[in-house]
Amino acid sequence: MPNPKHKTTKSKVGMRRSHHHTSPLQAVKCDKCGELKQAHTVCPACGSYKGEQVVAKKEV
Ligand SMILES: [Zn+2]
């Protein structure tokens, strides 16, 4: 049976996994309502995207 010749050290595992992180989501202000929202997405607060109303605003 083929087997690795040497044990993978914690150090080598750490070096390999150093690239496994994800970058935090970009938060930008909405053009319309100024609420913080995720970039390139419809605003969850007012339902607008690039200054246009694309989703009907939820009535509270
Ligand atoms: Zn908005």
Image (cartoon, rainbow, N blue to C red):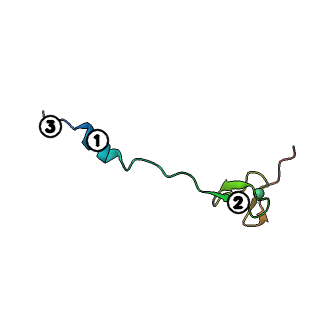
- For the residues marked 3 and 1, what is the alpha-carbon distance in whole angstroms? 13 Å
Q: Quadrant of the C terminus?
A: top right
Q: Amino acid at mark 2?
A: Lys
Q: Amino acid at mark 1?
A: Val
The image quadrant in which ligand 1 is located: bottom right
Residue 10 is left or right of residue 2, and the answer is right
Eyeballing the image, is 34 above or below 1?
below
Q: Which mark is residue 35?
A: none
Q: Are marks 3 and 1 in contact (CB under 8 Å)?
A: no
Name the residue beneath numbered marker 3.
6
Name the residue beneath numbered marker 1.
13
Image coordinates for residue 23, horizontal then vertical, percent: 49, 52
* Residue 17 placement: quadrant: top left
Task: Say which element carries label 2.
Answer: strand
* Residue 28 placement: quadrant: bottom right
Q: Residue furthest top?
A: 1
Task: Say which element carries label 3.
Answer: loop
- In front of the other: label 3 or label 2? 2
Neighbor class of circle 2 (other Cα within 10 Å; few <14, some 14-19, many 20+) is few
Name the residue beneath numbered marker 2.
29
